[in-house]
Amino acid sequence: MTDHSGLQAELRGGVRGEVGFDVTSRALVTMDASNYRRVPLGVVAPRDADDVAAVLEVCRARGVPVVARGGGTSIAGQATGAGVVLDFTRHMNGLLELDPVTRTAVVQPGLVLDRLQEAAAPHGLRFGPDPSTHSRCTLGGMIGNNSCGAHSVAWGTTADSVRELSVLTARGQRLRLGRDWAGAPEGLRELAQGELARLRTGFPDLPRRISGYALDALLPEKGADVARSFCGSEGTLGILTEAVVRLVAAPRARALAVLGYGDESAAAEAAAGLLRYGPLTVEGMAADLVRAPAGLPEGGAWLFVETGGESAAEARARAREIVRAADVSDSLVVTEPAAQRALWRIREDASGTATRMPDGSEAWPGWEDCAVPPARLGGYLRDFRALLTAHGLRGTPYGHFGDGCIHVRIDFDLLTEAGIGRFRRFSEDLADLVVEHGGSLSGEHGDGQARAELLPRMYGAETVRLFERAKAVWDPDDLLNPGMLVRPAPLDAGLRFSVLPRGPVDVAFGYPADDGDFRAAVRRCVGVAKCRTTTAAGPAVMCPSFRVTGEEEHSTRGRARLLHEMLAGELVTDGWRSTEVRDALDLCLSCKGCRSDCPVGVDMATYKAEFLHHHYAGRRRPAAHLSMGRLPQWLRWVARTRTAPLLNALAAVGPLAAAGKRLAGIAAERRIPRLARRTFTGWWRTRKPAPGPGEPASGGPGPGDLVVLWPDTFTEHLSPSVGRAAVRVLEAAGLRVALPPTLLPRGGRIGDGRAGPATALLAARRARVCCGLTYLSTGQLDRARTVLRRTLDLMEPVLRAGAPVVVLEPSCAAALRTDLPELLHDDPRAARLASAVTTFAEALERHAPHWTPPAVDRPVAGQTHCHQHAVLGDTPDRRLREAAGLTGELSGGCCGLAGNFGFEKGHFEVSKACAEEQLLPAVREAPERTVVLADGFSCRTQLEQLAGVRGRHLAEVLAQALDEAEREEGEGEEGEGEEGEEGS
């Protein structure tokens, strides 16, 4: 066995970049987006080509394999390795040059594709290939896999866009690859010239032939293009350090024709016939992939055909020409960019949504991207569906119909011996079917471990031996990514699920979407890596901490990988006590953005709460868990003792505040929010009683529906003005408002915040409802259960009455709607309360549909609360703002405070950076008279402390407008009266 004891030290001595042999560094790269797992010895983030050369020299001397890794989104296993993994995303990620005259760019391998597109766009240029992972895949990975994307019918594959490549061989030779044998290693030219007949006849001629080595690019009639032949070699021939790539002119305007067909075969058969019209894309997908086909034409399958032009009219005319030629019963032509993006998101998220069947069961890659000649696609799909049925499998095909390339995730059972056997048999049969249709086993993502074993079925034994000879020319020591493409590992070996526990894991949450199985919840992350997007697009939230740090361990995927390794117990050996997992989760804001933005619905906030619950079981917790985690308890004590003014005064004294923050684990940079002198329920008890049943509400049109207003901790103790405003608006809309009971009842009516003597005698004790949010976010799940069960006891009269529960704080509403039924999954009342929860805007829309809000007529700025976006949805809020004349869009992202997160010691800089991403710039750039909306207390606090801006809840804005309208009406009536007296 090779001795690796000095490997780390030698690398540290010879490399300027980071060298990570620690558990976290290794665990983060055990997997890519495939079914496979390989544990590396270490990870190196080289700073330049000299660092790469140093790594190769050390590893070659020690016989340690080297694997190049980009965004880690490879689907066939080629971005994992058992030796040293090179991570190019940290340092070698630059755009070195962009020349709009020659339409070329010089890039490093770790550059994310979207960064190149952003730089090229001002010049009217773009890089042609654009995989659905464009926001996180790297140019190096694209060259390694010869990636394509939706626009390949117009602009080809990555190989079509490569001019020159700078490459280091395993033996340290620096080569500049290009046409006419430029940069060819010694022996390559002789190898190719000795096999000209095979190179001319042994390679299928189709647009998406990615499998194997592209040795036919070395033919003299093809320019003896060494750079092109290197594309798609999956890091097995050399290490790319720099590339000169070709750019194309981007159309000034685009239109999208969406064509509806009866089924996918009909769509596939039509696709090839549309190519003569010069479309930019011909993408297809079937109805079983689309969970909500709203906005799509009628049909069981659709083609997305994009056209371009110098003007919108020209692009639209081309799209309509395609619609006429397609002869479909229903179609849609979309020219508005936002609407096009919304439709394209359905397609781009398919790689994630396809990992779940419509019934929620798991589906996996492995046969993700076979390609056949486009004219044969319809027949191939019919045969493919028949083969699935014969093996008792299901899948949802979609993909690049114009190029004959199909993506599909299949519900393989990769957990049992019988299921893995079926996986192998199906793989062999499908390989034969693809070859029968004249196709390629890989049409985009490469062979990797998933398909390389089957290459002899496609190419024959002699051509595969030629691949092995080519590999030996480039890499005679088999140092680079061994086990890929040539002499491959078996397709059913090293499956990432094999290391997970055989039996269920004891957990607190119910994980209803995963049949109560925490292992299945962790398996949700398949490595699509949408969480690694470096800029938040539109209303998206995920993953704010990654966008700040750029570190994989702070992405949703990175955390999921560490949880996977925790369950595996090979690298992370101390289970729930793992400090590596704890540290990775420390910067998770529990924003729940991944719950909605992740295509497979990973819910890292819940996983974090679960982990913290186990991690600190029977152990001393951090001070912040005791101070902010138990905030409702402390604030109720303050209210009972009426010490809010005293605490506010003490918090204003610098040394006392500093000492208090140190003791409570609060960041020194934070100001402690002021407590309200009078709580919301204190105000409620002293106001004029609300009308009883059948009585008109004050200011309202008459008896209306009863709604129960939830006095959350933040509204109750920190911003009661929000509660007062909500009461004002709800009653003005004709609704009857009540508060939850405050005494644990032995039966009785819905409480109204008051308790008479008779009721008090019958009650067990006085109590307050609570959503348990602070206990949940700090993983104090036993305490959360107690609090939530008590809340359900209090709310029983409300549940019996079926009254809606209006929750003003989005994070509390989200906790009640999702965390409550998932934590108390054994209590049917939990689901009933969750279904009763409505937001402020939902309550008005559902229960006062004929009410017209006051006209505010001002622009808005601010941010949609991350929990609102992820769990609750904001469509009713948008409609309410529109009805009130509040114009403009709220930004996406996360404010960065996120409850206790931004207050905790050590989190301030990350918290501030999150706010600076979208929220603070949006507010600073807002015009005068802009209303700054922030429904969450955390968002309002962040705005106040970082920007000196007062954000307001929508209820406050509407309540103020109601008051102003009443004043104006009163002044008008007074003026009319005086005028009348004068006239008399």
Image (tube, rainbow, N blue to C red):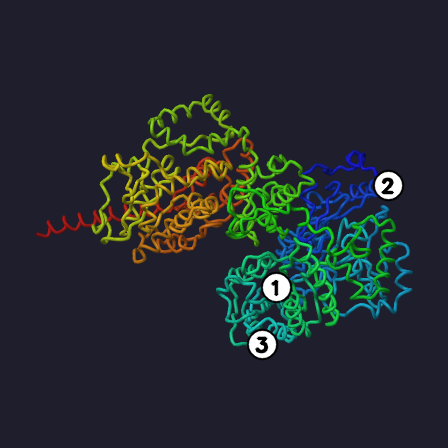
- Residue 120, given in percent of the width and then of the height, sits at 65, 55
Residue depicted at 57% across the width and 35% down the height? 615
Kind of residue at badge 1: Arg
- Residue 155, given in percent of the width and then of the height, sits at 68, 64
Check disc 3 and report the residue beneath it: 326
* Residue neighbourhood size for the residue with mark 1, other residues' Cα within 10 Å, grouped as few (<14), some (14–19), many (≥20): some
Check disc 1 and report the residue beneath it: 394
Above or below 631: residue 311: below
Above or below 341: residue 436: below
* Disc 1 from disc 3: Cα separation: 29 Å
Residue depicted at 78% across the width and 62% down the height? 455
Does residue 173 appear to the left or right of 833 in the view shown? right
Q: Give the foreground label among 3 and 2.
A: 2
* Disc 3 from disc 2: Cα separation: 61 Å
Kind of residue at badge 3: Ala
Q: Is residue 616 visible?
A: yes
Check disc 2 and report the residue beneath it: 61
Quarter in which the N terminus is drawn = top right
Does residue 314 appear to the left or right of 865 in the view shown? right
Above or below 727: residue 392: below
* Residue neighbourhood size for the residue with mark 2, other residues' Cα within 10 Å, grouped as few (<14), some (14–19), many (≥20): few
Does residue 32 appear to the left or right of 521 in the view shown? right
